[in-house]
Structures are given as C-alpha cells and as structure tokens.
Amino acid sequence: MKKDAHPEYHPQAAIRCACGNTVTAGSTVAEISVEICSHCHPFYTGKQKLLDTARRVDRYKKMMEKKQSMQKPRGGK
C-alpha cells in the first residue's frame, strides 16, 4: 500500500461561523469557515419569513378554515 494515501484527520477541527459561533467536529481540514450555521440561520432561530408572492399560502389557509367550519361532528353509536 502507498504511504500517505489518506489525508490527515483532525478530531478537533474548529468550524467558525460569520456570526461568531464556533463548533468542533472531526474533519480532514483543521479550520473551516462558514457563512451561516444553525445558531444564526432563520429556520432554526424562528425568525423565518415566508414570502408568498402569489398569495397561495393565504388561499390555502382560507380553504382549510372553510373546510373545518363545514365539517359536522360525527355522532357515534
């Protein structure tokens, strides 16, 4: 087998986000820079905004409300 066929593994590689958050993980690269992480991503922070240019979401919600109001409670035996 060839020597040095595999890259060097760093068990404590630092992953640094642009927001300042640092996470350690195993990698073949000693230090990784990312633009966005789970600490600052809008989906994970709850600050996600839903863009609805065709008003489809509103139309869907309206349809579901109408469906719920039209349903009758079922009487069991």
Image (cartoon, rainbow, N blue to C red):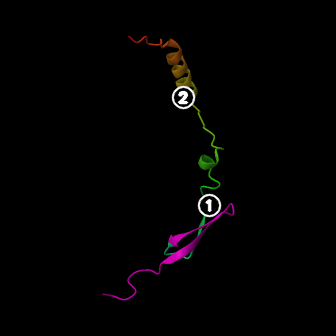
Relative to 22, residue 9 above or below: below
- Residue 9 falls inside the magenta stretch: yes
Residue 26 lies, with reference to residue 60, above or below; the image says below
User: Between residues 6 and 76, which one lies in front from this camera angle?
Assistant: 76
Which label's residue is closer to the chain start, 1 or 2?
A: 1
| Quarter location, residue 18 | bottom right
Q: Position of residue 34 (x, y in %)?
A: 60, 64
**Count of numbered marks:** 2
Judging depth in this view, the residue of 42 and 71 nearest the camera is: 71
Label 2 sits on a secondary structure element that is helix
- The residue drawn where x is 47% and y is 13% is 73
Find residue 3 and report its horizontal and vertical position in percent. Answer: 37, 89
Residue at the bottom extreme? Answer: 3
- Image quadrant where residue 38 sits: bottom right
Percent position of residue 62, x then y: 56, 21
Q: Residues within 10 Å of mark 1 (few under 14, many from 20)?
A: few
1 left or right, relative to 29? left
For the N terminus, the image quarter is: bottom left
Amino acid on which the number 1 mark rests in the picture:
Glu
Whether residue 48 appears in magenta in the rendering, the answer is no
How much space separates mark 1 and mark 2, taking CA atoms?
31 Å
Q: Which quadrant of the rendered structure holds the C terminus?
A: top left
How many residues crowd mark 2 within 10 Å: few (<14), some (14–19), many (20+)? few
Would you say residue 17 is visible in this rendering?
no
The answer to whether residue 53 of the structure is visible from this angle is yes
Image point (47%, 78%), residue name = 9
User: Which region of the structure is painted magenta?
Assistant: 1-26
Residue beneath the point at 55% across and 25% down: 61
| Label at residue 77 | none
Residue tagged by mark 2?
Answer: 56
* Dot label at residue 35: 1
Give the camera-side residue of 49 and 52: 49
